[in-house]
Image (cartoon, rainbow, N blue to C red):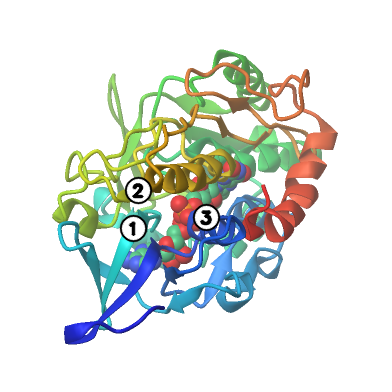
Amino acid sequence: MGPVLGNDVERSETLVVGGGNAGISLAARLLRDGARDVTVVAPQPVHRYKPLLNYVAAGEAAMPDLERPMADVLPEECAWVRDAVEAVDPAAMTVRTRGGRTLHCTTLVLCPGLVEDWAATPGLQSAYTDGWAASSYVPGSAPLVWPRLTSLRSGSVVFTVPPEPASCGPTALKPLLMACDHWRRAGVLADLEVRLVLPEATATGVAEADEVLERAFAGYGVEVLREARVERVGWDTHAVTVGTPAGRIVVDDVTFAHAVPHYRAPRWIADAGLAADPSPGLVDIDPGTLRSRRHGSIWAIGDAAAVATRPSGGALRKQVDVLARNIAGAARGKPLKRYDGYTVMPITVSRRMLSLNEVDRDGHASPSVPFLDPFTPRRATWLFDRYGLPQVYWRRILRGRV
Ligand SMILES: Cc1cc2nc3c(=O)[nH]c(=O)nc-3n(C[C@H](O)[C@H](O)[C@H](O)COP(=O)(O)OP(=O)(O)OC[C@H]3O[C@@H](n4cnc5c(N)ncnc54)[C@H](O)[C@@H]3O)c2cc1C
């Protein structure tokens, strides 16, 4: 952190709000490119590599595999304000923290991720507390999922893919399809009623990926409710009410629900006039340059930014690169680079097969390894997603090297 100005305002050149995938990799990259005065505001003591949460919920990883102390992942040269932002004043270029600090900067980057919107699904949080609902998206509940799924021999199970802006929603299919494979091998799949609630007509909106997934759903006998949302949950009656285009369906006597809450951006973004609309309240940026459409010195990437593509950690590899170049370019009056909307939706179709589903903003294949079809499920890509990528994340992505 730079000097303390009058009225206890602390000053830094670049202020990054959020210490997740976006904030840490960007801060590391800026410092690697020669920036001197970078501050990260992040309240949590722990940093999580979220993609592994789906493997925790599928019995293939444990929480310590994906958690590191925040102090260990923050670049050494950057200042850490261990506090949460609760207001932004774009005109003054200051943020106010919950702890009462006022931080001033020349360049502000917002990447605080999303918050759970439990109010959008009445009863769901109580079902989590009661123990018959849990999901990979709620870290505290993720370790409960696989023991519950594998203990089932009969009954009704509901899975959901969360509607956007939830991050990388289709990856919520990993626990479903890995569980189905397990149940089939255990000889109990036919005794289970498995339902999947999809927010859109198909799982990904990408024809090649959907074709593979539809085959898997049909093969496992999963009943798919399309363009559907969980509207409410009777936590005491174990009833899940699903709104569909054909009307409401009430699924009674649900034994277990892998029901992901809905998500929205933190409210202080819209309160500062930086969102296009109050709900979901994402930072309104030019999805190419990643610059705020409302303020030239404010930028945003990651799940809280309206990047006009499916939000994902993989997408951040490209966003960080474009943003680091654009912050430097804007300072020198150079033309800005554009992010092409690259994203990735790694989905397992069985316990050991996965397709990466890498696409650009228009849904066209955009493989990282040239000529490798990103929609074909492979054992090698499963191994890479489970074991290779986490190493790349800790050693390269979080260090601004990708
Ligand atoms: C279960 C799950 C599985 C996923 N699987 C994949 C996958 O397989 N592949 C893939 O590419 N992507 C996947 N993703 C998506 C990927 O993890 C996210 O896109 C990525 O983490 C977004 O990074 P972020 O920094 O924008 O947000 P986050 O990682 O959520 O980080 C936000 C940070 O901001 C901090 N913060 C919050 N509020 C404030 C505040 N007010 N002030 C300061 N700091 C604040 C938080 O504490 C946190 O440190 C998955 C996500 C989930 C949830």
Category of crowding for the residue at label 1, using alpha-carbon neighbours closer than 10 angstroms: few (below 14), some (14–19), many (at least 20):
many
Q: Which residue is outermost to the front?
A: 332
Q: Name the residue beneath numbered marker 2.
A: 299
Q: Earlier in the sequence, mark 1 or mark 2?
A: 1
Tag 1 residue: 108
Q: What residue type is disc 3 on?
A: Leu
Looking at marks 1 and 3 on the same chain, the residue that comes earlier in the sequence is marked by: 3
The reply to whether dot 1 and dot 2 touch (C-beta < 8 Å) is: yes
Relative to the observer, which residue lies in front, 7 or 226? 7
Q: Secondary structure at mark 2?
A: strand
Instruction: State the residue position of label 3.
Output: 26
Q: Horizontally, is 12 left or right of 168 in the view?
A: left
Local secondary structure at mark 3: helix
Residue at x 66%, y 19% (from the top left corner): 212
In the depicted structure, whether residue 149 falls above or below residue 178: below
Q: CA distance from mark 2 to mark 3?
A: 12 Å
Residue drawn where x is 35% and y is 60% of the image = 125
The residue under the point 67% across, 43% down is 179
| SS label for mark 1 | strand
Left or right for 401, reference 24: right
Residue 384 in percent (x, y) is at: 79, 43
Could you tell me the amino acid type at mark 1?
A: Leu
